Every structure is written in structure tokens, then in C-alpha cells.
Amino acid sequence: MIDEDDDLPPLPAGKKNYMTPEGHARLTAERRKLWNEERPEVVRVVEWAAGNGDRSENGDYIYGKKRLREIDRRLRFLDKRLSIAEVVDPRQQRKRDRVFFGAHVTYAREDDSEVTVEIVGIDETDTGRISWISPVARALMGKSVGDTATVPTPKGTEIIEVVAVEYPE
């Protein structure tokens, strides 16, 4: 049996699964769509294919069962993540001059290039959106404009400087 927890990005010991309201809504919508639309359709196809006789060479049946396992696995993943989620609305942040969860941060790298990231939950990462447990985000937490932070990288440490901190309105 495969342990579904193997697919979960690790949380630091004793930490919550922080998530933005938007990220929580996306995962909830994905779960709803899988449960209410995709899974019932795949079940119908599998039931139809099973009624066609020999299942060993029945592509619709074999593919349908495989897809059903994938959907069920994703549903278990979403259920686990949503059950431990702690929704944090960055619009409620009072210390808007410092970097905390949900901040949009622009920082300057040692080569004078600037990078802008949004600090989000581990299940929300994407281009320009980094997990609050990532090395860059952890180095930036609590910093203000003009502060520097040391970030461990595969090539050694890098010093970055906070250029801007913004929160959604």
C-alpha cells in the first residue's frame, strides 16, 4: 500500500498548514469538482465497461479503474490538507511594513537583479509564489524595507535586501 503522506510537502514539526483564503478556496473547489463531477463520470464509464465482458483486455475498464484510483488518491490528499489548514487572510495583517505570510515582497539579489514573490502556503506555490517554509521566505520573515537577509543556496549563502513589502487590499 502506498502511503499518501509521501506526496505531502513536509511541514515543520509543530507548525500549522497556513493557507490564504484564495488557496483554500481553490483546493475546496478542486475537491468539489473531483467528487461531484469527475468521479461520478469515471464510475459510470467503469460500470459500463465492466458490463462489456472480459475486463482483462478492456481498455475503457482498465483506464477507468486507473483514473478512479488517481482521483481517489487526490481526494484523500485534499481531505488531509484541508482538514489541517489554517486560513490566514493577509488583508488582515496589521504590521504591513514587515514581511509576514501573504506579503508580496520585492528583494534585490547580490547581482542587482530584483525578484518579487508572494509568500503563500505550501499547497499554493507556483511561479512567483513561494512557500512560507522555503529558505527565501524564512529569511525574509519579519524584515522591513532596507533590511538584509542571508539565504542558504546550493552555491553558498546569498545576501538579499528587501526593496518593497505590500499586502493585498
Image (spheres, rainbow, N blue to C red):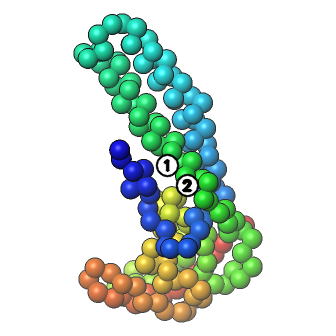
Residue 45 visible in rendering:
yes
Q: Nearer the viewer, residue 100 or 128?
A: 100
Q: Which residue is mark 1?
A: 77
Mark 1: which secondary structure? helix
As drawn, 65 above or below 29: above
> Hey, what amino acid is under mark 1?
Phe
Q: Is residue 163 left or right of residue 154?
A: right
As measured in the structure, the alpha-carbon distance from the residue carrying label 2 to the one carrying label 1 is 6 Å
Could you tell me which quadrant the N terminus lies in?
top left
Farthest residue in the bottom direction? 147
Q: Residue at x 36, y 30 (%)?
A: 66
Q: Residue at x 51, y 29 (%)?
A: 39
As drawn, 43 above or below 33: above
Q: Nearer the viewer, residue 84 or 3?
A: 3
Q: Which residue is mark 2?
A: 81
Near mark 2 (Cα within 10 A), the count class, few <14, some 14-19 or many ≥20, is some
Could you tell me which quadrant the C terminus lies in?
bottom right
> Hey, what amino acid is under mark 2?
Arg
- Where does residue 95 sit, x and y in percent of width and height? 71, 82
Q: Nearer the viewer, residue 130 or 69?
A: 69
- Where does residue 102 sit, x and y in percent of width and height? 61, 70
Proximity of marks 2 and 1: CB atoms separated by less than 8 Å: yes
- Where does residue 65 sit, x and y in percent of width and height? 38, 26
Farthest residue in the top direction? 52
Mark 2: which secondary structure? helix
As drawn, 163 above or below 127: below
Residue 128 visible in rendering:
no
As drawn, 143 above or below 134: below
Q: Residue at x 49, y 48 (%)?
A: 77
Near mark 1 (Cα within 10 A), the count class, few <14, some 14-19 or many ≥20, is some
Q: Residue at x 40, y 8 (%)?
A: 51
